[in-house]
Amino acid sequence: MALIWAFPVYWMINSSFLPHNRIRSTEPTFFPVDGGLSAYERVFDSGFFQSLRISATITLVTVAAALIFAFLAALALSRFRFRGRKSFLLAVLIIQMIPAEGLFISQFKMLEGWHLLNSVIGLSLLYVATVLPFTIWLLRGFVAGVPIELEEAALVDGCTRTQSFFRVTLPLLAPGLAASGVYAFLQAWNEFTLALVVMNRPGNMTLPLWLRTFTESNRVSDWAGIMAGSVLIAVPVIIFFLIVQRRMTAGLVSGAVKG
């Protein structure tokens, strides 16, 4: 089953090294023995690094802002009882049911009025609003799963309220923060339609938009270039997940033992 799931990834990497005539041939080529790096050279010469910088900036801003706001909201919803709490939870749930396409016109008009079209801040603001509802629900489950008695035990041992939170509760929430970060990262990194509406200038394209124009710049689709660009787009996602995966494993055990 793992080989079946991994085969499309292998085929993408394999095709990125093949010449155009071998890709379009009716006889499949499973090993690029006579391939080369010409597709990657064309990708690097077509504005890849500029789009990479824009996508990386937007994604990092989205992940950081979403985790901060969602974490504070999850703490408030799980640890405190206040008027309007259930209404807020219901509103968060209803927002997730609204199709993204139904908000494009209002979002475009809003950013146009704020002079934030074709800007990193404007698109990051929309991405944060998009991932925030689900991130709040996800983190709320993790926060509710950490017993309040752990913080109370730390208070008995002499910790202040702030110390008990940062030394005991926060390490136990590391898996939830990592999972929420992965979700926000993937949503911001791979999103296409909203970026197509907001970033409508050629010099302000994110990587998914850049990959589309890379295709349209040729009368015949350059499949080797498309595959090479897709490989390069996937590399930061893999690196980010490998880094976060270690944090998730460490967070499962750290903070649970006094020492």
Image (cartoon, rainbow, N blue to C red):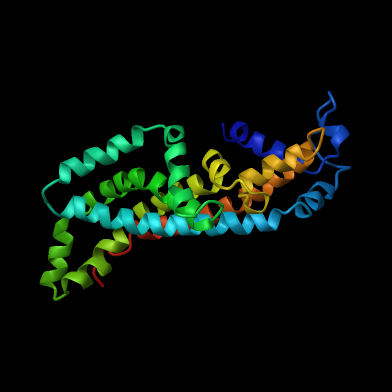
* Identity of the residue drawn at 34% across and 59% down: 68
Quadrant where the C terminus is found in the figure: bottom left
Residue 246 position in % (x across, y down)? 46, 58
* Identity of the residue drawn at 21% across and 49% down: 144
Of 52 and 232, nearer the camera is 52
91 relative to 168, above or below: above
Residue 187 position in % (x across, y down)? 48, 45
Residue 149 location, quadrant:
bottom left
Residue 245 shows in this picture: no
Say left or right for 229 vs 181: right
Say left or right for 15 vs 163: right
Residue 39 position in % (x across, y down)? 81, 46
* Identity of the residue drawn at 81% across and 38% down: 218
215 relative to 67, above or below: above
Say left or right for 117 vs 184: right
Quadrant where the N terminus is found in the figure: top right
Judged from this view, the residue extending furthest toward the top is 26
